Image (cartoon, coloured by chain):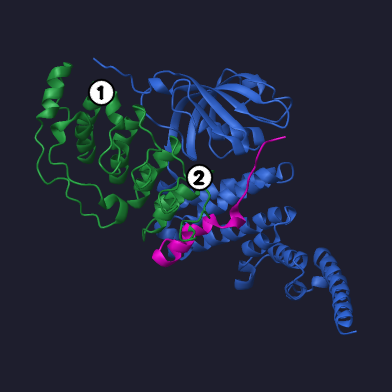
Chain colours: A green, B blue
Amino acid sequence: MGDYDSDDEKSQIEKLRYAKVPRGMFVSGWDDDADELIEEDNNPQASIERMILWAVNENKISEVRDILKLDAEAVFARDDDGYTPLHRACYNNFVDIAKLLLEYKADPNARTNLGWTPLHSACKWSNAECAALLLQHGSDVNAKSEGEQTPLHVTATVSNCRNTATVLLMNEEINPRALNNSEETAGEIARRTGMTFPVFEMGHQAYDVETGIID
Amino acid sequence: MEKFKPMSWYIGTEWKLPSKGLRKQVLSLDNYNQLVKPHLFSKVAIKIEDVENLNGRESRYLSNELLGQEQKVEMGSSLTPVDCYVELLVRQLVAGERARCYISTKGEDITFILTLLKIHETKEIHKLNAAEIYALALRYKENGVAMFKQYPIFAHDYFARAAKVLISYKPFENLSASSDSVSGEAMKLLFTQIQTNLAACLLSEERFEDVIYQTKFVEEEANSTEKSVYRRAMAFYQLKEYEKAQKLIESIPNYQEKKEFFKLHQRLAESWKSSNEQYKNLVKRMFN
């Protein structure tokens, strides 16, 4: 993907600005609530922020790296729904891009307009590798979006969520019995949603232990 | 020309886990190569320096002989509280990171400088196969057994982790020794052994409802161990569910000849009698 070998900033920004961006690449096949709101950008070259959001969605790591080298602040770009490049990397499970963004100080707890963190996005799309990466780098495992949904609630809505549920439920800081605004735990959602319900047993209080401060 | 060096912002940042009194501050990040931290299943090389306030607490990693030298650490192998927390801190470091670490105690904080020299092997928990999951759960269980007498809460933590690791592979019925290197029966057997150990920890913490939960399998399986039956019966006794406790005790062949069961049966009979008398008195008071 190394299209841009020159170190010259001007030439790089020009190349990025006029990079061929096929139309229609942002049409969403998703059929779900929060992430459904991500819309096509017909003119990603219009700004460096739009460019990085586009490049992440297209899994163009070289371009993302080039953009960040030119302007590290681009890591904080947001689309109209509040999604950052890290959100986009995480819902696509582009782990290497997510790592690159974190190296440039992407906020692992950035919020969309609906209060979703990148961890919510990773969980919604069953991207366990990204979820594990985010938890290692400061994501709040108990973050609540609008509707008081934690990443575990979001995970539980997916029928086969074994991997993401395991990653979350093995985390030392998780509150597995948090309630959403319908007064439901993630385990209750999992019971009616799908085949991964047995894994949610990990969240039963009989497995709670706190080793606390040592003597 | 690069305006911003990746990870330069990282130096000086802090990480905290207040519930366990853990904290680290990044001092440096040499030979940074890639953004990788050790997972629960990892083998790494570390170096420890400048230990203060260990004050005689047991620790393999912070002991004098090994200070300043490269030490190999396999995650999930620690057998003292200090070392368990050192492992947790190691998992917060990026390869190449040097950090000042703090472990709060009821006295002075233990402090030391920790360097994560190398990650030899690391694998996310969801990528472990059935045989690796079984081996990890077994190791956690054995560590818990080793720590139980001296450090019961840390033993409890190991047992809970072991159980959770196995649960991530539930339902076990689909596993077979030929295709998964471990059979569903073996997984189930290990799971019930761990639950029996959890029940011991929960009993001593007086979490009787949770003991009942962890020993449910006693009602479902014909070959439950006497230990698990005893712990369930004890929990029922403590919850004043005398009939259930009695039924369980009497399900053990020749229970009268088994000291623990016999004693519990006697205590049960006495408590039941006294509870019946209390009930009779209550009824009397109500109708007189």
On the image, the x and y values in percent for residue B199 come to 67, 58
Q: Which residues are magenta?
A: A186-215
Q: Which one is earlier in the sequence, the residue at label 1 or at label 2?
A: 1
Location of the C terminus of chain B by quadrant is: bottom right
What subunit carries mark 1? A
In the picture, the disc for residue A71 is: 1
Is residue B151 among the parts visible in the rendering?
A: yes
Residue drawn at x 39%, y 58% is: B179
Q: Quadrant of residue B10?
A: top left
A167 relative to A21 in the view: left or right: right
Q: Amino acid at mark 2?
A: Asn
Q: In the image shown, does B89 or B123 lie closer to the viewer?
A: B89
Q: In the image shown, does B191 or B18 lie closer to the viewer?
A: B18
On the image, the x and y values in percent for residue A30 come to 24, 54
On the image, the x and y values in percent for residue B195 come to 62, 58
Q: Residue reaching furthest bottom?
A: B287
SS at mark 1 in the image = loop
Q: Which residue is mark 2?
A: A171
> What is the distance, in whole Å, between disc 1 and disc 2 at their CAs?
34 Å
Is residue B146 among the parts visible in the rendering?
A: no
Find out whether residue A191 is within the magenta segment.
yes
